[in-house]
Image: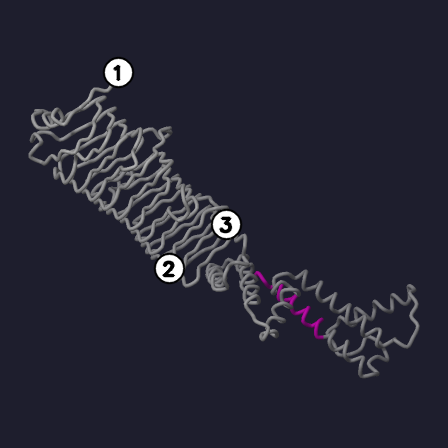
């Protein structure tokens, strides 16, 4: 069945004289509707207008500055090959279901709606949208539902909107604002107030670098479960007024996430996520924060304040060398507060190594001590290295001392001579000031390897003891 044309006169007569509360236009072609209609042009009983299987061509600017708060307009399975603009209107609801095509100019701007739907009703819909979609500067009072979309090219802008959603009732379990299971290309959600609750579960963001951002937004309860943020997810300057959940987000090879200058007023959960980079700079977490089973190539937490408990369980940083000392110290402090001794020891090592790398040549004494601590026992965490360090250093200095003692005598390798040498070595390992040989320490130069050996042996024994106590709380 072909599409019959719908001119403005027929449309006007339909909305003006129809006696029922709804009117339906099915399989019609609409071209270049630029005539402005006002509230008085509608029949007083008309509450619903639906376009089903219609095609729009040219410039469609039919609904401009229309104030009719009880009106519901629905576009069902429609195609927009021209431009569509709905601006400065007040409706009960504006709905786009299963839209087949949008143009390079698809604008919903400066309106006030109780309900706004722009979705595919089938979760597995194969409809691909190509074009520029702008939903900006609107106020939504009850519900926003933008789910199951597959926007693959162009740009998607949801900017400077306000969702004045009330807290959901206990009996209801649907989100007031939902962008779930959708794909957005070159998306921008910045400067938007998402209301009391919003979901981005299984959302995929694609496109150019830096365009997928949520800068300067306000969130209530926010869900990001299995969200693919693409190259960048920028939340700079945003405020989170309720619980935030990021769970199952993956992008360890590509995704850079930035929460700089953010304020988190309630609990925050980072669970089972992988990002290339996570930056949380100069931000405040006022309630409980949980990082569980997370993996980053690098992380930056400098200048961030955790007012309550922050736990880091199974945190993996693939490139610790790129992390600043302040970030590593912040994580270490939080691990200490939560009595996570195992991970605390790891991050103590990371912090000391980072500090060592910051030292200059003029600070060679501190650099030497840190290097020695690392070699001898991995900063007091590896008892085996402590034992090995003690034996090697003791063996080196004992050999030098043995040569100094018996340099004037011939020494042949036999079972008796090896036994004499090894007995002396084990006596040398004892932290005492006596020589392992009966007539030892006769000449002054013999004291040099002897004293240095005793110092390094005592140091190695101490590092070994400290390492055995590394799990002490």
How crowded pointer 3 is (Cα within 10 Å; few <14, some 14-19, many 20+) is rated as many
Closer to the camera, 364 or 129?
129
The residue that mark 1 highlights is 1
Q: Residue at x 12, y 37 (%)?
A: 68
Closer to the camera, 470 or 402?
402
Check the image and report above or below for 211 versus 21. Answer: below
Check the image and report above or below for 313 versus 129. Answer: below
Closer to the camera, 134 or 76?
134
Q: Is residue 175 magenta?
A: no
Magenta: main secondary structure = helix
Mark 1 → mark 3, Cα distance in angstroms: 56 Å
Kindly identify which numbered label has been placed on residue 161.
none
The answer to which image quadrant residue 77 occupies is top left
Kindly identify which numbered label has been placed on residue 295.
3
**Label located before the other in sequence (2 or 3):** 2
Closer to the camera, 444 or 342?
444
Q: Residue at x 69, y 72 (%)?
A: 458
Badge nearest the viewer, 1 or 3: 1
The residue that mark 2 highlights is 283
Q: Specify how the rendered protein is coloured.
A: one colour
Indicate the secondary structure of the residue bearing disc 1. loop
Magenta range: 455-471
Badge nearest the viewer, 1 or 2: 1
391 relative position to 332: left or right: right
Total numbered labels placed on residues in the image: 3
Indicate the secondary structure of the residue bearing disc 2. loop
The answer to which image quadrant residue 204 occupies is top left
30 relative position to 415: left or right: left
């Amino acid at each position: 069945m072909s599409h019959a044309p719908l001119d403005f006169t027929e449309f006007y007569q339909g909305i003006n004289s129809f006696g029922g509360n709804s009117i339906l236009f099915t399989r019609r072609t609409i071209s270049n509707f630029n005539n402005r209609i006002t509230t008085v042009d509608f029949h007083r009983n008309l509450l619903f207008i639906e376009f089903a299987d219609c095609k729009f061509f040219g410039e469609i600017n039919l609904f401009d500055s229309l104030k009719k708060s009880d009106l519901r307009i629905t576009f069902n399975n429609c195609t927009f090959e021209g431009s569509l603009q709905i601006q400065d209107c007040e409706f009960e609801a504006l709905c786009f279901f299963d839209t087949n095509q949008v143009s390079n100019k698809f604008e919903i701007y400066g309106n006030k709606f109780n309900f706004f739907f722009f979705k595919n009703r089938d979760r597995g819909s194969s409809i691909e949208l190509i074009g520029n979609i702008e939903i900006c500067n609107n106020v939504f009072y009850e519900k926003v539902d933008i789910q199951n979309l597959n926007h693959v090219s162009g740009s998607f802008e949801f900017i400077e909107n306000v969702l004045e959603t009330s807290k959901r009732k206990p009996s209801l379990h649907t989100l007031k604002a939902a962008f779930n299971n959708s794909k957005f290309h070159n998306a921008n959600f910045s400067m938007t107030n998402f209301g009391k609750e919003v979901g981005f579960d299984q959302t995929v963001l694609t496109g150019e670098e830096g365009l997928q951002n949520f800068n300067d937004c306000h969130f209530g309860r926010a869900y990001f479960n299995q969200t693919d943020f693409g190259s960048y997810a920028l939340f700079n300057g945003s405020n989170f007024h309720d619980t935030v959940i990021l769970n199952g987000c993956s992008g360890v090879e590509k995704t850079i996430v930035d929460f700089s200058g953010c304020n988190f007023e309630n609990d925050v959960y980072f669970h089972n996520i992988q990002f290339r980079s996570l930056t949380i700079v100069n931000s405040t977490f006022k309630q409980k924060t949980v990082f569980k089973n997370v993996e980053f190539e690098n992380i930056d937490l400098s200048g961030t304040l955790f007012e309550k408990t922050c736990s880091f369980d199974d945190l993996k940083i693939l490139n610790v060398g790129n992390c600043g000392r302040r970030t590593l110290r912040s994580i270490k402090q939080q691990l200490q507060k939560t009595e996570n001794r195992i991970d605390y020891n790891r991050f103590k090592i990371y912090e000391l190594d980072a500090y060592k790398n910051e030292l200059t040549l003029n600070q060679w004494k501190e650099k030497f001590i840190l290097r020695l601590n690392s070699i001898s026992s991995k900063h007091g965490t590896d008892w085996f290295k402590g034992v090995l360090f003690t034996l090697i250093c003791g063996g080196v200095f004992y050999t030098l001392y043995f040569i100094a003692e018996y340099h004037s005598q011939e020494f042949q390798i036999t079972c008796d001579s090896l036994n004499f040498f090894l007995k002396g070595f084990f006596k040398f390992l004892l932290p005492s000031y006596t020589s392992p040989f009966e007539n030892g320490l006769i000449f002054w130069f013999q004291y040099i390897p002897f004293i240095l050996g005793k110092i390094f042996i005592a140091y190695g024994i101490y590092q070994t003891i400290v390492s055995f106590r590394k799990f002490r709380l």
